[in-house]
Image: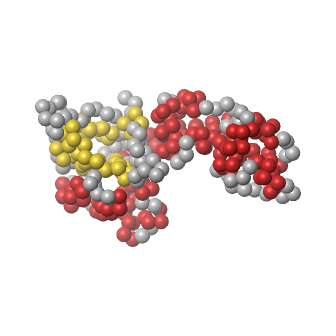
Amino acid sequence: MKPGLEAIPLTHGGPSILAYARIEREFPWNWHYHPEVELTLITRGRGHRLVGDHRAPYRAGDLVLIGPNLPHTWASEGSSASARANAAVVIQFLPTVFPDALRTLPEFAGLADLFARARRGLVFPAATVARVRERILGLPAADPVRAWTLLAETLTLLGASPARPLASEHYHSQRAARIGSRLGRIIERIETEGDEPLDLPAVARVAGLTPTSFARFFRRMTGRTFVEYRNSCRIRRACRLLAETDRAVLDIALACGFRNLSNFNRAFQKVTNTNPRGYRRRHEGRDGAKERIG
């Protein structure tokens, strides 16, 4: 079964850590993946979990760390009369919540290795769960700064503790190759055909996703919307033409995929902080001058 891409509200300007208590009558089958790292502690209920190609039973006390884009689901056993029969604490975050510069510090030296191992999913023994349980339970109610501190403490302890990988190495390698190949095909299409009338639905078809799922996938993987990335590619070409030729600005705009001069001017200003004519004047007489765009 093909997993679905789950959209998690960790957007620009929003929270960097999403922590919540999941309390339901049952945990339904929901085979999905997302670019965020996920730490899940089961506090009530039992059933089976599937992580990549690894299936195993779970019960209260089950603690699993899921790396980016690794398909997974927890499915509880049957239905219950109680609306609170199944419960878990779920923590989701992008690895960039701990910047590379921070990971070079001795105190955080184990994070890079922990995230690398989590690409296959990790399950932790009961002794480790006992050490981190109270920190995890405190995360949903914590303010943003305290949540970051609790998460850092939790992951540091997990990084120093034994853990068993879940998905096979073969599954992870194949999965990573498919995701990398998908993104590579998309970027190549935008870079080579960006001056064509290339819209989001057309590129979504290349990726094998719905337009909505593709938009979420592309932004998560690149940090930009599809339109922002496509326009930055078009503007790079326009800059070369403005600096190296005497073609009219409107002619360049149309050649680079813009429908009219107004749209071109707005996009150009957004990317370069100047207008096309101003850019050309700055580069008149410069032989081989270059500027980094996008």
Counting the numbered discs, the total is: 0
Q: Nearer the viewer, residue 5 or 142?
A: 142
**Residue drawn at the location 42% of the way across and 70% of the way down:** 105
Quadrant in which the N terminus appears: top left
Instruction: Give the image's coloring scheme.
Output: secondary structure
Q: Residue furthest left?
A: 81
Q: Is residue 5 left or right of residue 156?
A: right
Q: Residue furthest front?
A: 262
**Residue drawn at the location 29% of the way across and 57% of the way down:** 142
Q: Residue furthest bottom?
A: 106
Q: Is residue 59 visible?
A: no
Q: Nearer the viewer, residue 43 or 268?
A: 268
**Residue drawn at the location 85% of the way across and 55% of the way down:** 284
Q: Is residue 253 left or right of residue 134?
A: right
Q: Is residue 284 left or right of residue 51?
A: right
Above or below, 123 relative to 152: above
Above or below, 216 relative to 128: above
Q: Is residue 34 left or right of residue 90?
A: right
**Residue drawn at the location 37% of the way across and 53% of the way down:** 17
Residue 290, image x and y in percent?
A: 75, 56
Residue 201, image x and y in percent?
A: 56, 29
Q: Is residue 32 visible?
A: yes
Residue 256, image x and y in percent?
A: 73, 38
Residue 223, image x and y in percent?
A: 52, 48
